[in-house]
Amino acid sequence: MKTVICPGSFDPVTKGHMDIIERASKLFDKVIVAVLNNASKHPCFTIEERIGLLRETTGHLSNVEISTFDGLLVDFAKLRGASAVVKGLRAVTDFEYEFQMSMINKKLCPEIETIFLNTSQEYMYLSSSVVKQIARAGGDISMFVPEEIRDKIVDRLLNM
Ligand code: PNS
């Protein structure tokens, strides 16, 4: 049984995240989506809100579980019996940071692999920050977030 972790801030989950989670769920037996609970990152959405949005958008994926962690990702991965961390890689901008993280994680815990999935072309440019910017400015985020959570994201960002 191959278990992998899809970690992130998910502030909020976007179609880009869903692309990676759905593809990982086809490749592995179990996918644990791990939401970083770290107040120093000052997320817009609370940990409960981020988990709730992810539960709503992944309900159709029977082998996907939503969880949360703080501290080191590799410790969480070991605790949950995962053999790898799966991350989406957008255009060149992500590479340096993700490469550094994967090397550090390998040093901290050599038995946990990092697997990169190239983000699908239509989501190469997408990020949670861009979604927040557009929604706060009254723009349409339908193209960027799953339909079932669009209104919740907009309401929340316009009422901050
Ligand atoms: O969606 P993000 O913000 O790019 O996700 C980043 C995340 C959560 C994967 C990363 O910040 C992380 O793994 N944080 C946990 C702390 C850790 O293990 N750091 C690695 C060693 S420096």
Image (cartoon, helix red, strand yellow):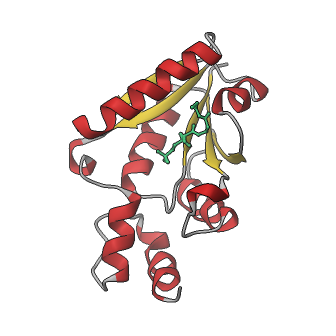
Q: Position of residue 17 (x, y in %)?
A: 43, 49
**Residue 43 in which image quadrant:** bottom right
For the residue pair 16 and 96, the one nearer the viewer reads as 96
Q: Quadrant of residue 143?
A: bottom left
Task: Indicate the quadrant containing the N terminus: top left, top right, bottom left or bottom right.
Answer: top right
Q: Is residue 141 among what the camera can see? A: no
Ligand 1's quadrant: top right
Residue, x 31% and y 83% (percent of image)? 137
Name the spot of residue 40 as percent of width and height, x first. Answer: 62, 56
Relative depth, front residue between 147 and 145: 145
Residue 89's spot in the image, x, y percent? 34, 35
Q: Residue at x 48, y 71 (%)?
A: 148
As drawn, the residue found furthest toward the top would be 110
Q: Is 133 placed above or below 35 here?
A: below
Q: State how many labels appear.
A: 0
State the image coordinates of residue 156 (x, y, percent, origin top left): 53, 81
**Residue at the farthest bottom position:** 159
Instruction: From this view, report whether residue 123 is shown above or below residue 140.
Output: above
Q: Is residue 56 visible?
A: yes
61 lies left or right of 90:
right
Residue at image position (43%, 26%) is 100
Q: Residue at the location (71% across, 44% down)?
A: 69
> Residue extending furthest right?
79
Above or below residue 148? Residue 2 is above
Point out the residue furthest to the front here. 40
